[in-house]
Image (spheres, rainbow, N blue to C red):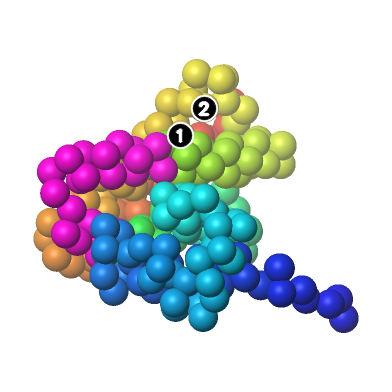
Amino acid sequence: MPLVLQEDILPEQILQAALHLYRKHGLKKVTMDDVSKAIGKSRSSLYYYYKNRDEIFEAVMDTLIRDVINEIEVAVSKAATVADKLRAFCLTKVKTSEDRKAFFSAIEAGMDFDEMSRHAQYMSQVHKRLMAAEATMLKAVLAGGAKSKEIRTLKPKELETLIFVLLGGIRGIRRELQQESSFARLEPAVDTLTGMTMQWLKKED
């Protein structure tokens, strides 16, 4: 069994403590002192890994993105067919978003207009990174389906358009269901989206 060093543990402790504090107090009110007290270490221990609280927040977001992508990848990997993989992708994408909705609401607590504006700009970059990772995952699913002859091979522009439609479609479905305050129609909506997609992906005669 490999030896786990304190140096390997501390960064994870820092991020977990920061995550807990963000949920409880919001991003604005959490300081380096708060995080150091939460893990029972001096501020110098934090500065060894992170220069300031912005770097800690960015590291927390990096971890969150990895966790989201990993959760979706696991669900997709368990599905056998392209249709099932697309369905698993969509359903798990909505699940991961809803699971973290409270966190994103909490971190914005107490922000003024300027702070909210800067935060929105940063979150826009997070969104783009997440979209890029999701697009890569969908490309792998579609490439695998074409290789196994389950679906036709797509031209580059067709592939980009389909991924745009799928990612935009599932986010649109989620937003509308949020407006309804009910996710009862999620599975039928996802089944319709994936069904239409598979019909379009049918192999050419």
- The front one of 54 and 189 is 54
Residue at image coords 44%, 77%:
37
- Residue 25 vs residue 5: left or right? left
Q: Position of residue 6 (x, y in %)?
A: 71, 74
Residue tagged 2: 159
Residue at image coords 66%, 72%:
9
Vertical comparison of 66 with 35: above or below: above
Q: Quadrant of the C terminus?
A: top right
Discs 1, 2 touching: Cβ within 8 Å: yes
Residue 56 seen in render: yes
Query: Which structural element holds mark 2?
Result: helix
- Whole-angstrom CA distance, mark 1 to mark 2, is 6 Å
What is the magenta range? 104-126
Return the mark for residue 88.
Answer: none
Return the mark for residue 163.
Answer: 1
Query: Which structural element holds mark 1?
Result: helix
Q: Position of residue 168 (x, y in %)?
A: 33, 38
Give the main secondary structure, helix, strand or loop, of the magenta stretch: helix
- Tag 1: Cα neighbours inside 10 Å, few (<14), some, or many (≥20)? some
Q: Position of residue 39 (x, y in %)?
A: 51, 78
Q: Kindly identify the amino acid type of the residue bearing the numbered disc 1.
A: Ile
Residue at image coords 45%, 34%:
163
Q: Position of residue 81 (x, y in %)?
A: 60, 53
Q: Kindly identify the amino acid type of the residue bearing the numbered disc 2.
A: Leu
